[in-house]
Image (tube, grey):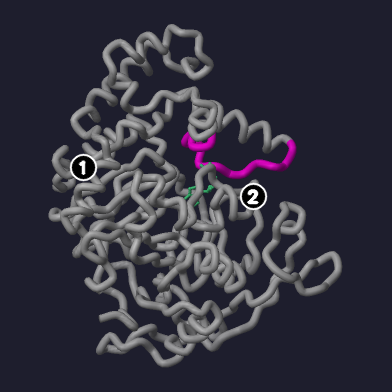
Amino acid sequence: MRSMLVPGKATCILGAQFGDEGKGKFVDLLAQDADLVCRVQGGNNAGHTIWVSGRKVVTHLLPSGVLHPQCEVAIGAGVVVDPLVLRDEILRLKEQGFDLAPERVHIDFRATAILPAHKAQDLKREFERSQSGTAIGTTGRGIGPAYASRAHRDAPRLGECISPGYLEHFAQSGHPLAEGLTPETLAETMEACQFLRPYLKDVAMLVHNRLNDGARVMIEGAQGGLLDVAYGTYPYVTSSNLVAGSCPGGIGMPPTKVANIIGVTKAYATRVGHGPFPGELTGALEEGIRERGHEFGSTTGRSRRIGWLDLVALRYMACVNGYQSLALMKSDVLSGLTDIGLVTAYKDKRTGELMNGWPMTAVAWENIEPVIEFAQGWQQVVDSKNNLDPVCEQFVQRIENWIGVPVSYVSTGAERLEGVWRNVR
Ligand code: IMP
């Protein structure tokens, strides 16, 4: 697996579904051999869960690489950062015994700050949408409003927030984003920003220098391609670009430095929040998979919707992202099922006709009916020698043939060491 990380180059690990694919575990696994792991987009809408020796560690803003002492971590200018959340996360991980020294944790001055007004706007907008039945089901963390105000060139960035007198002045300025900066929240925000001060750097230049020194760099995607603001199931998406092409920009790295792009998918599908979900399950099957897979959001605790693996979407994501290999997570959760569904085509439910190509409009998404084929299930995903069950192996090969991308890793349990490498030295 060391061969997946190339000295002086970057490897992108990207969610190929609606987020929550198990990227945290996969990144954590590869991070053993990495020198630097970077977050490039999103914010604390993400939640990465890693199980280490029976201990659950969750990160929202820091990349999963932070759990490996030899690995530096970076948050790029493309990320939206709630200063209080990041400060608390650093303190929590420190308490758990991890090294969070500013020498190994780098945050770009230019990351956009999430302010109380962004969170209030997010909740208000969601409430308004819910009145007309069009709520997105956002995480309520202020992500969309923060990106919108960056696009409007209104939002302060972390670099501004640590400048002497800046936030006090901003709070008095009558600026719409100053709303919610009460004396109390202003003091808290200023304190959190000052805490972050030693971590703030020119991360683009730092990454440039590390790559020149031969570092093995990883980009840890947040969310998943189907939530990309341009290529996902718009408008039921997040507010950033998540596709491979946008990742280097989020940290200030030239695209020519990306050597490897790996898509991460579960053996089934989940979605949090509203929006189209071909292959969605209901009833006992849905509940059983949710329980076995612990499919409750690590950020909001919401129950995740459950569905069969969607090969149509995975193939489209493979085209848009250029995955060179796939990691298939949580195959153990399906153990014991007699039949396992796979979405292999979309029909237009108004006409009953097979759809040609990818749905391009919200109306097209609303009218999708999935065509589902069934594969044989397996009892135990691995034998006592950690060989993949032959029936599961057939399932994996079926995915590879469909997508035209090799599966390099099959996760067979939550713990770091539960998994099988394929096609990898
Ligand atoms: P937002 O990113 O909070 O604006 O939420 C927009 C949509 O993306 C909602 O459906 C969220 O549930 C979903 N979402 C955002 N972040 C994640 C994630 O990390 N995992 C899964 N879904 C996410």
Residue found at the very far right of the displayed protein: 351
- Image x and y of residue 99, in percent: 14, 46
Q: Residues within 10 Å of mark 1 (few under 14, many from 20)?
A: many
The residue at which mark 1 appears reads as 105
200 lies left or right of 111: left
- Residue type at mark 1? Val
Whole-number angstrom distance, CA of label 2 to CA of label 1: 34 Å
Magenta stretch: includes residue 256: no
Look at the image and tell me in which quarter the N terminus lies: bottom left
386 lies left or right of 21: left
Magenta stretch: includes residue 137: yes
76 lies left or right of 354: left
On residue 234, the disc is 2
- Image x and y of residue 397, in percent: 47, 86
Residue 287 visible somewhere in the drawing = no
User: Is residue 317 placed above or below 361 in the rendered structure?
Assistant: below
On residue 50, the disc is none
Residue 136 visible somewhere in the drawing = yes
- Residue type at mark 2? Tyr
275 lies left or right of 404: right
Segment colored magenta: 132-144
User: Is residue 71 placed above or below 318 in the rendered structure?
Assistant: above
Residue at horizontal 56 percent and vertical 64 percent from the top: 306
Q: Main secondary structure of the magenta part?
A: loop
User: Is residue 362 placed above or below 6 in the rendered structure?
Assistant: above
Residue at horizontal 70 percent and vertical 68 percent from the top: 357
Question: Is label 1 in a helix, a strand or a loop?
Answer: strand
Residue at horizontal 44 percent and vertical 86 percent from the top: 392
Residue closer to the observer: 413 or 147: 147
